Amino acid sequence: MSATFGLTLKVWRQATPHAKGRFETYRLANVSEHMSFLEMLDVLNEDLIGKGEVPIAFDHDCREGICGACSMMINGRPHGPQRATTACQLHMRHFADGDTVIIEPWRAGPFPVIRDLVVDRSAFDRIIQAGGYISVSTGSAPEANAVPVPHEAAERAMDAAACIGCGACVAACPNASAMLFTAAKVSHLGLLPQGQPERYQRARAMVRRMDLEGFGGCTNYGECQEACPKEIGVEVIARLNGDYLRASLTARETRVAGPE
Amino acid sequence: MELNARIPDGPLERKWDDHKFRLRLVTPANRRKYRVLVVGSGLAGASAAASLGEMGYEVLCFTFHDSPRRAHSIAAQGGINAAKNYQNDGDSVHRLFYDTIKGGDFRSREANVYRLAQVSANIIDQCVAQGVPFAREYGGLLANRSFGGAQVSRTFYARGQTGQQLLLGAYSALERQVALGTVKLYPRTEMLDLVTVHGRARGIVTRHLVTGEMERWAGDAVVLATGGYGNVFFLSTNAKACNVTASYRAHRRGAAFANPCFTQIHPTCIPVSGDYQSKLTLMSESLRNDGRVWVPTKQGDTRPPGQIPEGERDYYLERKYPSFGNLAPRDIASRSAKDVCDEGRGVGPGGLGVYLDFADAIARVGEQTIRDRYGNLFEMYERITGEDPYQAPMRIYPAVHYTMGGLWVDYNLMSTIPGLHVLGEANFSDHGANRLGASALMQGLADGYFIIPYTIGDYLAGTRLEPVDTSHPAFGEVEAGATGRIRRLLSVQGSRSVDDFHRELGRILWDHCGMARTRDGLTRGLELIPALREEFWRDVRVLGEGEEFNQSLEKAGRVADFMEFAELMCRDALHREESCGGHFREEFQTADGEAQRDDERFTYVAAWEHAGPDRAPILHREPLVFENVQLATRSYK
């Protein structure tokens, strides 16, 4: 009932972190328009297994666009051509018969390749460890409605908190900057009354960790917001810059937590 | 095997408080001398690891994901229940308790469920303090929505991403402890087996998924928070990596598995589109607040929905269950959808779908309001189907979603293996035969934040644990077994892929142990599964090596365990000759097609003991005693 078509796929294959990688070309017939992009790769992998070739490794899990595991450049764009869409939610109806599709891993120094399309994004966890939290231990929380949060603040915080930690922003940035990721967390917590006590210290510590991990600086290309599957905008970066500036001016009063 | 649920004496309302006072404590200075291994980093695992770390225990937390934030809790959409009664609409701890017991079709423990309702309010406090951006009213106070199986508004939510926000809260608490050095985190590390020494859980064996290295970890207690087993059906709403291996391996080492046949089929999922389908996508139950479920009254009516006049539509949930309507519990809504499709009134390809229609809601409150409430869900639907649900009704169909069964635990969340604690979806404790919407998040966080921190101390303080390290022979034996299984999987070099076998297993289960079950079907399933398992070990093709990043090998190990576990599910479904909650045996139904329980014979938890390979498991029964609610036939009419 649904239309099927054929594709040529050029896929990055790299056996180990230090092996030399290369593009392999595969032809795939009978792609259905209703398949997700990852289901198309599943079909290719089943073909490869049938031929006795090792299947393509790629990170994926929820396939609902929320876990942030999937991470591939599709025709040069993180997560592919559709706006606000992760690779797992991209469907093949956006491609046409005879198309050539180039599939690569995220390419950024702080995200080394593990195998094929799989990269190591643990640097993001270390940025969170540096201060992406509110220091409240279990049991010590006040009554939930004791502190009202203006509706607008909660909505803006939620916009920033929608980040799925996929790394598309880094992959899209010519500088491999992690500013959008870092700024999203700083904004989420900094917009809420609960996040105020650690607000400036948090901004400083997280930026410092980001720099130590080898991510580049932000020079306002804005590619990150174009690539973000959750449509987080660069205004969070402006907010981070404001908090960071204030933190730097008052640095003597703050203490940078987290590992050096 | 003896099942001692350790339910405290005394009135229901006082059990947990009295129990907490009686539990032995580990003094702050002594806690760092105890090492706790937490497996899993979802809501239950991350909240437990963070809380135990804060208390001063030495915590090691393992996840097979690249980051704890990817655990499948992240995908929960609709919300989390709590008995705050902010809406002044008659909610209370007792009502949340009662709704959950009734929703579970009277197959859960009163004491556990009451405790869950009690701590529910603390969860919301904790999450708000962590910065979880719950929806707010314009006055700045917390908003609520309604969910299935309840007549009050007690569900807290963060758009359609409540699980994500709660998990990020727990994850941030966990990462804070990692930075402080109380928790060590081991990502891309999969538990392959449990190590017991003198009958106590003393460690685990893991495989590092990047290098393939096998590693041994010793500790004083083990906490499994490894989720549910819905992926045994291959197609489910679970994330692709969800599996039963940690639970099943623990089962093989002596942990009783309780009610494995209690699986939840969620009524609102996007229908299957083709045989390449890799998973099914849930559309949050919250949509049933505003969406009306219907099918044509006539069989085989292929007109587009817009051309079917009002008088020729059957809003069957509103018709059959006028007081709950479209918010009937999941098991009932799913079965009703199956019934109308079986009658030939289903819609869409293959007739396996029903409409979820927002036209009335859009006319009533406007498209913008609907967009504010469910915008991300509508977008997701459009992305997957290419259809615009603002213009035409959604098509939905039931799909496997959650598993109420799990490892048996006592009131302290300890399994039948001393020292092995089980939290969240991985245990069986709170949802009976059917879980209500927005209660999984509540249970995962209740277990991790507010129960295990108390009960694990009692175990550690009250047990004389001999020093054990990974040089103990028990570790060597378990590691050799795990390594041997990997070698065996790689050496078969057969002709069929792991996914191919997994799909077939899923089809067997869906047909014979799915939404409606019969003696004959289950008996047939019990013939087909061992035959498929035998073929798997003879003909599976797993390429690559063990000492490298090898996703086929990861899957193969998980599917191998599903192949054994599926049999246990069917066996449990066959023995339970009644219908209750998600377990519907066609032989046991009322005249109007509702589930018919047999309280005389089956008011118990079925806890299965592994009796060794190729031997039938042994059934143990934990009677369920209801002192505070009256067993009634569930009615949502």
Image: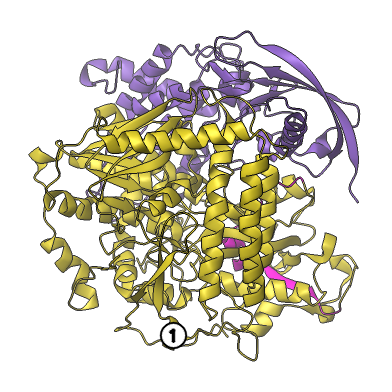
Q: Badge 1 is on which residue?
A: B601
- Which of the 4 image quadrants contains residue B299? bottom right
Q: Which chain is yellow?
A: B
> Residue B59, position in %: x, y?
26, 37
Is residue A84 visible in the rendered structure shown here? no
Whole-percent x and y of residue B58? 22, 35
Chain of the residue where label 1 is placed in the rendered structure: B
Magenta-drawn segment: B276-298
Position in image of residue B529 (x %, y %): 62, 58
Left or right of B585? Residue B473 is left
Q: Is residue B114 left or right of residue B355?
A: left
**What's the amino acid at mark 1?**
Arg
Q: Which one is nearer the viewer's eye here, B522 or B453?
A: B522
Which residue of the protein is positioned furthest toward the front in this rendering? B614
User: Which residue is outermost to the bottom?
Assistant: B591
Q: Quadrant of the C terminus of chain B?
A: bottom right
Please report the residue visible at 20 percent of the width from the left and 54 percent of the height from the top: B454
Label 1: few (<14), some or many (≥20) within 10 Å? few
Say whether residue A159 is magenta: no
* Image hue for chain A: purple
